[in-house]
Amino acid sequence: MLKTRVLRGAQEIRPSRRLASISPYAFAEVGKLVASLKAQGITPIDFGVGDPTTPTPEIIRKETQKAVDTRKSAGYPSYIGSKEFRVTVSEWLKKRFDVTIDPGTEVCSTIGSKEGVFNFHEGFVDPGDYVIIPTPGYPPYARGTLFAEGRPYFIPLLPENRFLPDLKSIPEEVCKKAKLLWVNYPNNPCAVCAPLSFFEEVVAFGQKYNVIIASDEAYTEMYFNDLPHSILEVTKEGVVAFQSLSKRSAMTCYRVGWVAGDKRIIDIFKKVKTNIDSGTATFIQDGAIAALKDENHVQQMREEYRAKRDILVKALASIGLPDCTPEATLYLWQRVPEGMASVDFAKRLLDPKIAIVVTPGAWISDKTETGLNPGEGYVRFALVPSLEATLEAAERLKALKS
Ligand SMILES: Cc1ncc(COP(=O)(O)O)c(C=O)c1O
């Protein structure tokens, strides 16, 4: 019998160049900070990651539990989502944005938006193609681009432009070689909405340069005043919108969302999906249908976020920081004290007497061509701790009063 001698440590295990080229995921780093405080016996109030702590509403939990039994057999789910799910999505889009989406051809379910956003690039980006990405922004836009061997071109979101990207600032050569443009309103982390005229401008840009517009609309339901728009209100042509139930219905663990829009784009995305995964579990899609048919829990959630927002905005203003009242989302994009780096302010909040975890803006922002990091000078608070914990945080912030 042939004996193979295993020499431990002799084999070199290395990540791919693509993986090695990217920095650690910012929120994994936030997790480490929380763990280190806990190891010191301190319970931090964690405004770091935007993961709702409110329980998933009962109607959704009940429907999901029921579906596990009624569906009994556990065959692979549909790649593109069950017919009932796609029909419900289409009805919801009609009701909410007055857009008509064919459930048969213009929508595909996703395993939460993260998977869809990241893998989307595989369908459209060839090595060396540009993808235009707002910064600060949701990391999978850039990471998905890099994994598809594309080139991110970062456009800054700046307060002087109301945190909207200045499309005219993109060099002609980049526009011509770009395959995709990402937009995200209501915006994480800048917490602003975009007017419909902005979406019109974006669509015109896409048509002029033959660039697909991918609109990440994960926060359209988390608003405080006016109803946010969907890009689909402008057109479906050359456009897709990603939506997620994670924040709307506190379903981050369920992993369910969808992408809807131009049939030609959806067709290519479906092909990507059949090669990568097997769709969201059908009983989860049943829970999602129940979620989409109910708006009461979403209204309740908005009220809860509003109460927490008001407490924290006031507490931050009372220690001398500029007003950061968000228009939408579950985030506060707070300017740090003049002359201080975002990481230093975040560390200051980790002082055991304060023990508040936030995300430094510089960690969720990439540098632009000019070397500017537009997230520098900000920290992000995710309004996910309970109301009581938020009140406690407001109390602890008083320690920073100069
Ligand atoms: C801007 C944005 N898009 C998409 C997502 C993805 O959410 P999920 O994958 O849970 O659907 C998030 C989550 O934080 C987000 O902030």
Image (tube, rainbow, N blue to C red):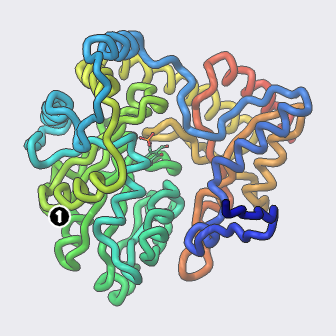
Q: Secondary structure at mark 1?
A: loop
Q: What's under tag 1, amino acid-wise? A: Gly
Q: Is residue 125 above or below residue 106?
A: below
Q: What is the quadrant of residue 311 in the picture?
A: top right
Q: Residue at 30% across / 59% down in the picture?
A: 214
Residue 219 place in picture, x, y as percent: 39, 40
The answer to which of 318 and 326 lies nearer the viewer is: 326
Q: Residue at 19% across / 55% down in the picture?
A: 266
Q: Is residue 39 above or below residue 367?
A: above
Residue 340 place in picture, x, y as percent: 78, 59
Q: What is the quadrant of residue 180 in the picture?
A: bottom left
Using a 10 Å C-alpha cutoff, classify the residue at mark 1 as few (fewer than 14 neighbours), some (14 to 19) or many (20 or more). Answer: some
Quarter holding ligand 1: top left
Residue 131 place in picture, x, y as percent: 38, 72
Residue 283 place in picture, x, y as percent: 31, 23
The answer to which of 86 and 337 lies nearer the viewer is: 86
The answer to which of 206 and 70 lies nearer the viewer is: 70
Q: Residue at 57% across / 82% down in the picture?
A: 370
